[in-house]
Image (spheres, grey):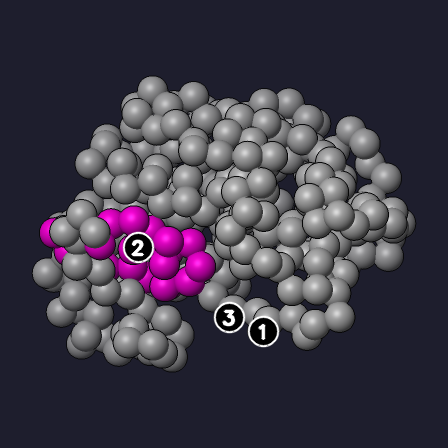
Amino acid sequence: MRLLIFGMGYTARAIADRLEPHGWRVAGTTRDGRDGTIAFADHDRVAFEARAATAILSSIPPDADGDPVLNAYRDLLGGPVLAYLSSTGVYGDAGGGWVDEASPIAGRRANRNAADVQWLAMGARVFRLPGIYGPGRSPLDRVAEGKAHRVDLPDQVFSRIHVADIADGVARGLTAPAGAYNLADDLPCSQNEVVAYAAALLGLAPPPFVALETLSPMARAFYAENRRVANGKARRVLGWTPAYPDYRFGLRALSATTSPASASAAPAPASSDHR
């Protein structure tokens, strides 16, 4: 079995690591073809891998021109099983209510909404993901680096998912019916609660509250949306159960296996890949 991944970033690498021990051969693209990957613009090599693939997964988010994979390689997507990493942001603001796969697509990012719809129309398994955390990319790291904050919005909640649970859900979804699947944990809650718990695990005081208007436009947009993401379809159809059913399980596991950098250490450079 062969998988071609468009966008070998953080989450896609976890998916590859989940599949490779089970006999999958995985090839992936990055913007520049680093670390043994294929450069996204190398059409000949991409076409070779796409024609040999059992499944194709895209983790590349849309840009101002739309979905880069559909724009460049739509003609190669007709045969294999298709999968796409989307975002629960397509649901928009639900006022703190629950959303599931039948909820309207009403997100603030029109190109993300359009990409989600286009991949579904092509028969893909579309995995809608909330806030992603895992090794090296979690509230523990942000607190330790002095980058975490709290905002005095006690009624704002959101869902999250450990990267290992995404990998398991996608692995199961590759042999499941096409359609949308929410992969989220069981405990939507305030970001403040998560940050305070991470600080306690590190033996640190919770970071201070900051005014919403002091945040970047992207961060303010995050806090403008308020929703709880239901995962019942993935449980029923995929037979998926999150190994980390809430942030406490996930952060305790990360705390036991990693040592986040102290606030005095220089932070690691950010990845240029979205996922």
- Considering the numbered disc 2 on the image, is that residue within a helix, a strand or a loop? helix
**Which residue appears at 65% of the width and 64% of the height?**
261
Q: Is residue 54 magenta?
A: no
- Give the residue type that dot 2 points to: Asp
- Rendered position, 151 above or below 178: below
Is label 1 in contact with label 2 (beta carbons under 8 Å)? no
Q: CA distance from mark 1 to mark 2?
A: 22 Å
Q: Is residue 10 magenta?
A: yes
Q: Residues within 10 Å of mark 3 (few under 14, many from 20)?
A: few
Is label 3 in contact with label 2 (beta carbons under 8 Å)? no
Q: Position of residue 27 (x, y in %)?
A: 23, 64
- Give the residue type that dot 1 points to: Pro
Q: CA distance from mark 3 to mark 1?
A: 9 Å
Total marks drawn? 3
Decide if residue 121 is on the left or right side of residue 199: left
Tag 1 residue: 269
Tag in front: 3 or 1: 1
Q: Which residues are magenta?
A: 1-20
Tag 3 residue: 272
**Which residue appears at 70% of the width and 49% of the height?**
202
- Considering the numbered disc 1 on the image, is that residue within a helix, a strand or a loop? loop
Is label 3 in contact with label 1 (beta carbons under 8 Å)? no
Q: Residues within 10 Å of mark 1 (few under 14, many from 20)?
A: few
- Rendered position, 170 above or below 50: above
- Considering the numbered disc 3 on the image, is that residue within a helix, a strand or a loop? loop
**Which residue appears at 52% of the width and 69% of the height?**
271
Tag 2 residue: 17
